[in-house]
Amino acid sequence: MPTPLAVVELTLAGLLLGGIYSLLSVGLTVTFGVARVLNLTHGEFMMVSSLAVYLLFQFTGGAFNPFATLGLLIPILFASGYLFEKFLIRPLRQKPVDVIEWAPLLVTLGVALIIEDIAFMTVPREFGVSYSLPPTRIMGLTLSTTRLASLVLVTCVALALHIFLRRTFIGKAIRATIQDREGALTMGINVNRVSAITFGLGVSLAAAAGVFLVMIRSVDAYVGLPITAKAVAIVILGGMGSILGSLLGAIVLGISEVYVSFYSPAWSFTVAWIILIIILLLRPQGILGKRAERV
Amino acid sequence: MARALPAVGVVVALIIGILGGFFAATVISPQERVVVTSVATQVVTTTATVGGGQPMTLTATITRTVVERPTPPKTIIIGATVPKTGSFSPVAGPFEKLYLAWQDLVNERGGLYVKQYGMRLPVKVVIYDDESNGETAARLYERLITVDKADILLGPYSTPVTLPVIDVVAKYGTPIVTTQAGAPPIYTRGLKNVFSAIDLISTWSYSYFDMIKAEGKARTIAFVIQDEAYGNGLMAGAKPKAQEIGLRIVAEEKFPVGTTDFTAIILRLKAADPDIVFVAGLNPGAAAFVKQALEQGLRPREYHVPQLTKPFLDTVGVRNANYFTGEWFWTEGIPYDGYFGREFWMEAMRRAGLTNDLYPWASVTWQALETVAAAIEKANSLKPEDLVDALEKTYVLTISGPTQLGRDFGQFTNVGLIRAFPVQLVDGRFRVIWPPEIRTAEHVYPTPWQ
């Protein structure tokens, strides 16, 4: 059994991991909710963000604070996501129904593989940044300052997202489109524009996750698709299209992984899929998802 | 006087003949097989009266032998695969450039000497992409043997990819020198044509433990093991060796490849408070663990990370890893020149655009190339059986010290001698700290944490 101090440390570690997962999965959820496209490039944008942090850190001889890259990368990747939707996803909507069903999936998969190869040609090995801060000691606890700072920033990003979705017109439009695309259209919402903005938003969140991830571990060009798979599992766990569900699912998964690894590190990977199977069997709509009408 | 001239001529001819025979006997060594294509014999008879007495008849038989060697091939073909794509490509994909740089450098100095032809022949390295996959590699090695007609082979990267290849080369008998495959199953099948320049992976850390024993300062050790071939292979030797030298194992933590969070392991290690934390794993796993351990305040007397490479230091930070110890097969300061000379090795790395700290397995690839070259130059011919025979007898000084390929011990066959050297990172530079005869600095222990 972990000691009380160990419980605090494990919970904080789980919250940070869950926070990173939540940035990824919430981004994927909003994209799926609005555009009805499972964006398989999601993890690749996270990897690109990690790569950008690495390159900036290397070229400046470690002078560039990785946290500061958030301010630089979020707008750039927002624009990338916006253009990605506009030029690669939107044209597919004009195609016949049977093409619309599978084409976006293949397009996003194809782009994911292209991004992987370009990233690999840029840095053909795993990469990480050596940025770290001295540990913080509070009441007998020795905590990672980098992780605490990351946790604070992840929380800030999540809060900013919450405010954006609740208080701004675009945020409300996004939520409305997630709830009822046709309804939003009849209410005069420019669904195409909302869709592109949502892609930009999703990619920005993935970029933020990439910044935090590369600070706690090294990554490589091929990390994207496995991460996307995990994000999909979290989205299903939380309930497809439910932003709060994804947030909750990510936290549950982060904490579960850390606690399971305390007893058996080998099972920490499997836990995501075990939880997913249990949820699908007991509550197929996910933690906060809406039950579909029976036909 | 004029009548004596023919006799003098015959005597001179005999002397020339004897000298010619002696010269021919010394040039053509007894082991060398030659092909006699034509023999012409000429009998010369002359009669002369010497000193006014009875006429004397001298008969000399002059035999002219035309010796012709078999037609040499245009090149010596050396076959290999590298993981240009797939999971091992970041670590070993660029070794294609190293092979080609070696090929060019060898050819620039005239090639390798082949005794059978009495001349140097250029080398050609035929390389394919094995996609980091054993089955693909096995197919490609079959192609190298049957289509490309490789004279000798260099193994692929890693044990999992090498194992299926061994089945193929066992079938054809073509000699192979493995490169980065030190796991026991490759060398327990008694295959006479499979060789390794380096020792088994389980012995790689022996020098480090010899040093710890000689110093007598450390008492306890904790092992953090990445659950894959490298980590487990290293541990197969490191754990019993640690026990043998009297270290108490206070923790043994295994983690799977891809682990992101190490908090649980770090908490248990903090409670165990070991003198040495021995990280038996590849990057990025090893780097992620150490980075998080440092951030969470785990400060043992020493971190020993065998894979103390540039990707590791990029993640952990050179300053944070100050006084860490690692294990390298070659680094600046190791005094051996190698088969071709140190400059040759440095030039090949320069041409390939590789650095030792970024690609530490390049030196192991180089050792395989050194042993292959030595065997070719020693062999009676390029036939597989002669090359195998030469490899068995090859004792070569590589850039990492001497190795002998035909070494059999216990259940193992044809395992080399080279083991990793303990090194220590001090203020951004690596120092060789053991064995005493080649160390460039004393081992700093315990770590003076800032």
Image: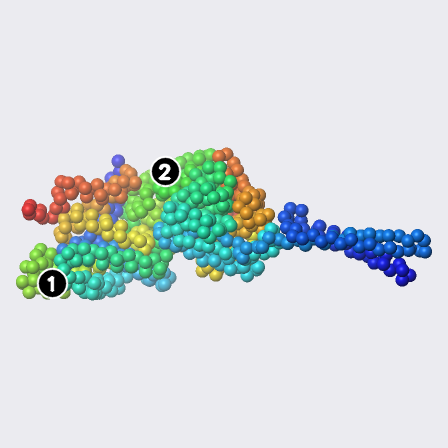
Q: Which mark is residue B224?
A: none
Residue at the disc numbered 1:
A191
Q: Position of residue B160 (x, y in %)?
A: 39, 44
Of the pair B77 and B318, the residue shown nearer to us = B77
**Quarter-of-image position of residue B240:** top left
What amino acid does circle 1 point to?
Answer: Val
- Residue appearing at x 11%, y 56% in the figure: A178
- Residue appearing at x 15%, y 56% in the figure: A98
In the structure shown, which secondary structural element does the residue marked by tag 2 occupy? strand
Q: Position of residue B298 (x, y in %)?
A: 35, 45
Above or below B239: residue B33: below
In the structure shown, which secondary structural element does the residue marked by tag 1 occupy? helix
Residue A157 seen: no
Above or below B279: residue A98: below
Residue at the disc numbered 2:
B252
**Quarter-of-image position of residue A171:** bottom left
Q: CA distance from mark 1 to mark 2?
A: 56 Å
Q: Give the letter of the chain under mark 1.
A: A
What amino acid does circle 2 point to?
Answer: Glu
- Residue appearing at x 16%, y 58% in the figure: A100
- Residue appearing at x 56%, y 52% in the figure: B339
Residue A117 seen: yes
**Quarter-of-image position of residue B266:** top left
**Mark 1 or 2, closer to the camera:** 1
Could you tell me which quadrant the N terminus of chain B lies in? bottom right
Q: Give the letter of the chain under mark 2.
A: B
Of the pair B223 and A33, the residue shown nearer to us = A33
Above or below B9: residue B171: above
Other-residue count near label 1 (Cα within 10 Å), few / some / many at <14 / 14–19 / ≥20: many
